[in-house]
Image (cartoon, rainbow, N blue to C red):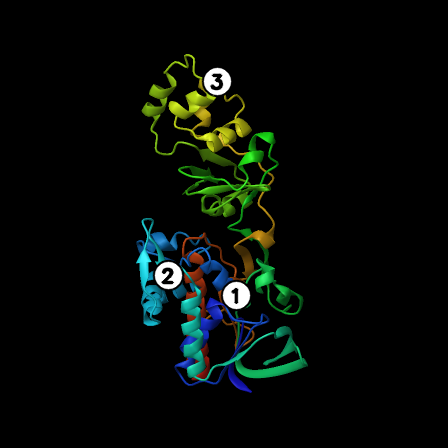
């Protein structure tokens, strides 16, 4: 038997192990993949956006559900704390123009390597290729390469991720056996839109579309999108996932830096001998890929009257969000209303949850990793209270 069994070697599970290993508890952390932090490493391929440097209330507003447990976790481990933690591992950081915080090396591997080495030195037991299949009281049964194995613990933390990127370990198979826990159905978040393109777009697959903004409902996003064979992807569309799931329409602003007067003045200029394409390029500064999007979605892109609307409010016709397995993250998971303040099941003392298993949602931009780390630490502090027999708040 160990003191604490942590199931899931992503940021939430590793942060819990980090905190509890300083207190000399016997900790075993297991993962069903051959190595820890697979999704964390994948995030590092795009630079590892650890957190967001902005006023804290603005940061919190990016978590629409705002459950008391999640807010408490984020207040306990703020974006400033994330930066302090990363630098304590010898990782130099920088803040980009939009407030996003990255390691200077723009990789996850140096941080993860140092982190795991630190846990090893503290005596944390790491086990790989172990898939949990059932829970019986405070014992967990695993499928391993050598057959089934049971591990008992005084406290168990589940940090097995959501339902996206199955090849990296977040496959939500725990839904099949963790049946005494109530969950909100998982749905795709931070994912692209599915679009049946016409021939106008064929030549632009893989092309980035820069200097645009998008809006869905009350949510507005300014960022790059990329045209793919199946639709559009990229940071500019990901943050609209929640609004799109609610059925809100999606609108594209092709000239976000133009005000109404600039647009009216430009549209009053005659076409003369220039082709319509050259007019759009020279007068309105629309490159070829933006012109293709205009033709794709405009009801009449050759009418200046319609142009005045579509350039700033082009409605994107689509077939909904892409599949959950293509999503960066998922909404849904273990409901907070059955957990106490410390992220422990109220009716099952000793069973805790953290990370994307929990029912919260957030856009990309540093919010996802920060919340995973924060809930991992918050649950670890709850485990400390349990094991030290302190009274829970």
Identify the residue shown where x is 47% and y is 22%.
277
> Is 359 or 98 nearer to us in this picture?
98
Q: Position of residue 97 (x, y in %)?
A: 31, 49
**10 Å crowding of disc 3: few (<14), some (14-19), many (20+):** few
Q: Are marks 3 and 2 in contact (CB under 8 Å)?
A: no
Counting residues from the start of the chain, the first of labels 1 and 3 encountered is 1
Identify the residue shown where x is 45% and y is 69%.
376
Alpha carbon distance from label 2 to label 1: 18 Å
Residue 250, label in figure: none
What secondary structure is marked by label 1?
Answer: helix
Q: Are marks 1 and 3 in contact (CB under 8 Å)?
A: no
Above/below status of 196 relative to 72 = above
> Is 43 or 287 nearer to us in this picture?
287
Above/below status of 354 relative to 106 = below
Q: Position of residue 11 (x, y in %)?
A: 46, 67
Alpha carbon distance from label 3 to label 2: 49 Å
Counting residues from the start of the chain, the first of labels 3 and 2 encountered is 2
Residue 38, label in figure: 1
Residue 105, label in figure: 2
Q: Position of residue 46 (x, y in %)?
A: 45, 55
Residue 303, label in figure: 3
Quarter the C terminus occupies: bottom left
Judge from the rendering whether residue 326 lies leftward or rightward of residue 146; answer left or right: left
**The quadrant where residue 87 appears:** bottom left
Counting residues from the start of the chain, the first of labels 2 and 1 encountered is 1
Q: Position of residue 229 (x, y in %)?
A: 59, 41
Quarter the N terminus occupies: bottom right
């Amino acid at each position: 038997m160990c003191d604490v069994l942590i199931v899931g070697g992503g940021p939430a599970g590793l942060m819990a192990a980090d905190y509890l290993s300083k207190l000399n508890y016997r900790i075993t952390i297991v993962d069903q993949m051959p190595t820890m932090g697979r999704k964390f490493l994948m995030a590092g391929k795009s630079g590892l956006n650890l957190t967001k440097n902005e006023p804290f209330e603005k940061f919190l507003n990016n978590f629409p559900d705002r459950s008391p447990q999640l807010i408490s976790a984020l207040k306990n481990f703020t974006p400033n704390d994330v930066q302090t933690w990363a630098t304590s591992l010898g990782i130099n950081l920088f803040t980009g123009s939009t407030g996003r915080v990255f390691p200077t090396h723009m990789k996850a591997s140096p941080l993860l390597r140092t982190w795991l080495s630190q846990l090893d030195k503290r005596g944390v037991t790491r086990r790989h290729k172990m898939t949990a299949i059932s829970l019986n009281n405070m014992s967990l049964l695993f499928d391993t390469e050598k057959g089934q194995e049971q591990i008992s613990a005084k406290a168990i933390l589940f940090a097995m991720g959501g339902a996206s990127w199955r090849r990296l370990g977040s496959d939500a198979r725990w839904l099949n056996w963790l049946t005494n826990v109530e969950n909100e159905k998982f749905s795709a978040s931070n994912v692209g839109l599915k679009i049946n393109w016409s021939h106008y777009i064929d030549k632009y697959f893989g092309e980035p579309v820069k200097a645009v903004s998008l809006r869905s409902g009350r949510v507005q996003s300014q960022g790059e999108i990329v045209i793919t064979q199946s639709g559009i992807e990229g940071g500019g569309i990901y943050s609209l996932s929640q609004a799109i799931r609610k059925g809100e329409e999606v609108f594209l602003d092709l000239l976000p830096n133009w005000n109404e007067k600039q647009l009216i003045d430009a549209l009053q200029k005659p076409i003369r001998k220039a082709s319509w394409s050259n007019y759009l390029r020279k007068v309105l500064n629309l490159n070829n890929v933006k012109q293709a999007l205009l033709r794709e979605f405009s009801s009449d892109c050759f009418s200046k009257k319609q142009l005045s609307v579509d350039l700033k409010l082009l409605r994107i016709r689509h077939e909904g969000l892409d599949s959950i397995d293509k999503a960066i993250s998922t909404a849904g998971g273990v409901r907070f209303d059955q957990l106490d303040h410390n992220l422990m099941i109220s009716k099952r003392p000793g069973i805790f949850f953290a990370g994307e298993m929990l029912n919260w949602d957030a856009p990309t931009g540093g919010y996802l990793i920060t919340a995973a780390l924060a809930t991992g630490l918050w649950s670890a502090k709850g485990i400390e209270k349990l094991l030290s027999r302190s009274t829970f708040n």
